[in-house]
Amino acid sequence: MKFKLVLSFLFVIILFDNTYSQTGFYFKNKNSEKVSLSFKKINNLIVIPVTINGKELSFILDTGVNKTILFNLSSKDSISLMNTEKVTLRGLGGGKAVSAIISRNNRVNIKQLISIDESIYVVLKDFHDLSGKMGTTIHGIIGYSVFKNFVVKINYRTNRIIFYKPDNFKYRKCKKCFTTELKYYKRKPYLKAKVQLDTVGDSLQEVKLLIDTGGSDALWLFEYSDKNIKTPIKHFRDILGEGLSGTIYGNRSRIPKFVLGDFKIPNPTVSFLDTISTKASRNFKYRNGSIGAGMLSRFTVWVDYPHRQITFKKNSSFRKKFYYNMSGLDVVYAGRELVKEEKTNRNFNSAYNEETNIKNTISFVTRYQFRFKPTYKIKSVVKNSPADKAGLKPGDKIISLNRKAAHTYTLSNIIAKFQERDNKKIRLVIDRNGEKMKFEFRLKKSV
C-alpha cells in the first residue's frame, strides 16, 4: 500500500548488462530556449504523455530511475520496438530479478522534446498493477534521459514542467530559495539533508537521499545504512509498495524534524524499510533513503543535472501537515462498468393551456441513461487495522463511500478520505460475491 498512503513506487533498477549509454532528449526545434509541458498530478506523482515510435502512452516522470521502462501494454497499445534482446532487472522488494527485453534505437517524443536513439526496457508483466493503484492507465516510467540535458523546473501547484536549455539558463535571485549540490550514482541524483530522529534533545543527523519524484511518500529511511537510523518505538507495520523484485515491507512512523538547507519541516511521516526489501540498493552504501514526492510537492523545484545542482522554493503546500492512510485499506481501480443514471429535464411552457385554464406551466421529464463509470475494489487489508477489525476483505467491491456512490469519486479522492483526520467515521457499502454488505469503522491514528 504505497500511498501516503499515497502510492509510492521507488524503482531502484540494477541492470546486469550496463554497457549501453543513452544520448537523451533534446529540443526538436534547435532554436528553442525552453519547452513547457502540463502534467497530471496523481497522488503527487507526475504523469506525462510519451510517444514511442508514433504511439502515445502515459508515463510517470521519475528521477529515481536511470532507465526507460515499459511494463503495461495491452493489445490496443501495441507498438513497434526496435532491436530487441533479453536482459535481467532487479529492483526493491524481496523477490527475484525479473526477465525483460531491451529495445534500442527507438524514437521517443515528449511534446517538443525528442530522443531518436532511446533504449527501452520492456517488462512483460505488470507485477505491481500500477494502473490499478493510480486509477488511470500507466504504461511505464521514464527518468534520466529526460532530465540529463536540461534544467527542469517542476511546479507542483500549477502542474507544469518547463525544460530549459542549460547553456543560456540564468537563475533569478531568490532569497527564499535553497540550492544544494547533486551527487550521482548509476545516473541517479542524491542530495544531503538532515533528520532529527530522537524526540529527546534536538540533535540532527546528516543523511544522503535519493531524489525520487516517482515515490509518493515524503521520506524513506534505510535502517541498515546507519546504526543510528532506527524505527521509532511508535510505528506500525505496513506494505509500502511494489518494486520490480516484489512487495516492499517496512514500518511507518514519524520523526520530529526534517531539515533541507534553511527549510525546517516538523513531524513528517517516514517509512523505514526492512533489510530484505532494500537488498538491491545496498551496493551504494552511502545511501540512507529517499526524499519522495510527498515532500518535493511542497516546493517548486529546479532539477539541474547539467550543473549538478537542485533548487527548492517553498509553495503554498509547505505548511500542510503530513498524513498517511489510517484505514488499513489498499484500494485500487477495477475497471469500468455501465451505471444507470437518472436525468430530469425541466421544461417551461408560457403558452395558454385550455384544459387547465393556466397560461404558464412547468413540466418535468425524467429520462434514464447508461454510462461507463469507474469501479474500485479492495486489494489488501492491513492486519489489525480499523478496516480489518470491521470485517472488510480483499476483493470486496466498493459500491458507496460515506453515502456517495463510489463512481462519483476518483481514486485520489478515496485515498484522501482515508487520510482526513483521526476518528473520522467511514461508512462503506460493498459487494462481496454478489451480496451487498454495510460496514462502519473510524480512522485510527497510530503514530
Image (tube, rainbow, N blue to C red):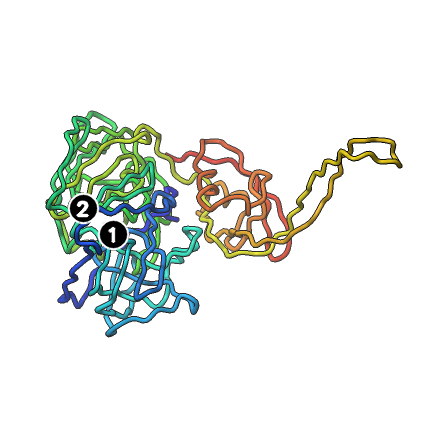
Residue at the extreme right of the image, as rendered? 355
Question: Looking at the picture, how far across and down is residue 154, in whole percent?
Answer: 26, 41
Q: Residues within 10 Å of mark 2 (few under 14, many from 20)?
A: some
| Image position of 102 with respect to 426: above or below | below
Front residue (pair 198, 440):
440
Please tell me which residue is depicted at 27% across the width and 39% down the height of the picture: 296
Count of numbered tags: 2
Front residue (pair 256, 355):
355
Q: Is residue 77 visible?
A: yes
Q: Which residue is mark 1?
A: 275
Front residue (pair 409, 249):
409
Q: Quadrant of residue 219?
A: top left
55 relative to 23 in the view: left or right: right
| Image position of 118 with respect to 261: above or below | below
Question: Looking at the picture, how far across and down is residue 243, in whole percent?
Answer: 31, 56
The disc, 1 or 2, on the residue closer to the chain's N-terminal end is 2
The kind of residue on which mark 1 rests is Thr
| Image position of 315 with respect to 287: above or below | above
Dot 1 and dot 2 residues touching (CB under 8 Å):
no
Q: Which residue is mark 2?
A: 33
